[in-house]
Amino acid sequence: MEAEVVQQMVTSGASSLAGLMATAAWQQVSSRVGRLFGRGREDEAADAELELIRAEVVEAGDDRDALADPTAVLRTRLRRLFREDPAAADELFEILAEFDPERFRKQAGTTYVINNTIENGTHSGTTIQAGIIHTMRP
């Protein structure tokens, strides 16, 4: 993987995981993330590490400065994980896509999928899409 793409995946993944940790959705996803982080070691150790990070995220609340530390830990952990096992990036992408499908769209290879939907009528000719187009894998 290209270094820039990996960095985007690390940054976006860490931010999204920290966001999930602060919500009730974490209960639904924590075991899957624990298995992902626990590759090559005991799941309990990975779960304990994630719970420590989650406690910091919850304690930080809306304080962006306080949230920076646990998010940095997640970035470091993801960077190491992706270096050791590049397939882990795809697994994280799948997990995050379930909770934020608009941000993490399915893609084939390195092609980004953008869907345009036209409602209440027919269309022919040129379509212009406006707005933000995320150019990162997650």
Image (cartoon, rainbow, N blue to C red):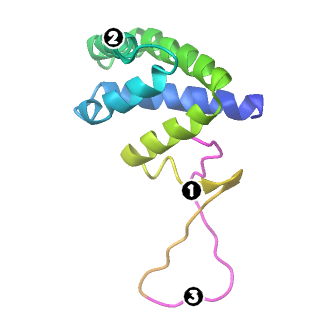
In the picture shown, does residue 82 fall above or below 102? above
Q: Amino acid at mark 2?
A: Ala
Answer few, some or many: residues within 10 Å of disc 3's Cα (few below 14, many 20 plus, some between 14 and 19). Answer: few
Residue 59 placement (x, y as % from top left): 27, 11
Q: Residue furthest right?
A: 2
Dot 2 or dot 1, earlier in sequence = 2
Residue at x 43%, y 12% (from the top left corner): 70
Q: Amino acid at mark 3?
A: His
Residue 14 placement (x, y as % from top left): 49, 25
- Residue identifier under label 1: 131
Residue 44 placement (x, y as % from top left): 34, 14
Q: Amino acid at mark 1?
A: Gly
Tag 1 and tag 3, C-beta contact below 8 Å: no
Residue at x 61%, y 60% (from the top left corner): 113
In the picture shown, does residue 72 fall above or below 81? above
In the picture shown, does residue 37 fall above or below 32? above
What numbered label is drawn on residue 48?
A: 2
Dot 2 or dot 3, earlier in sequence = 2
Disc 2 and disc 3: Cα gap in Å? 53 Å
Residue at x 52%, y 17% (from the top left corner): 40
Q: Is residue 133 left or right of residue 45?
A: right
Q: Secondary structure at mark 2?
A: helix
- Give the magenta range: 121-138
Disc 2 and disc 1: Cα gap in Å? 40 Å
Tell us which disc is closer to us: 2 or 1: 2
- Residue identifier under label 3: 123
Disc 1 and disc 3: Cα gap in Å? 20 Å
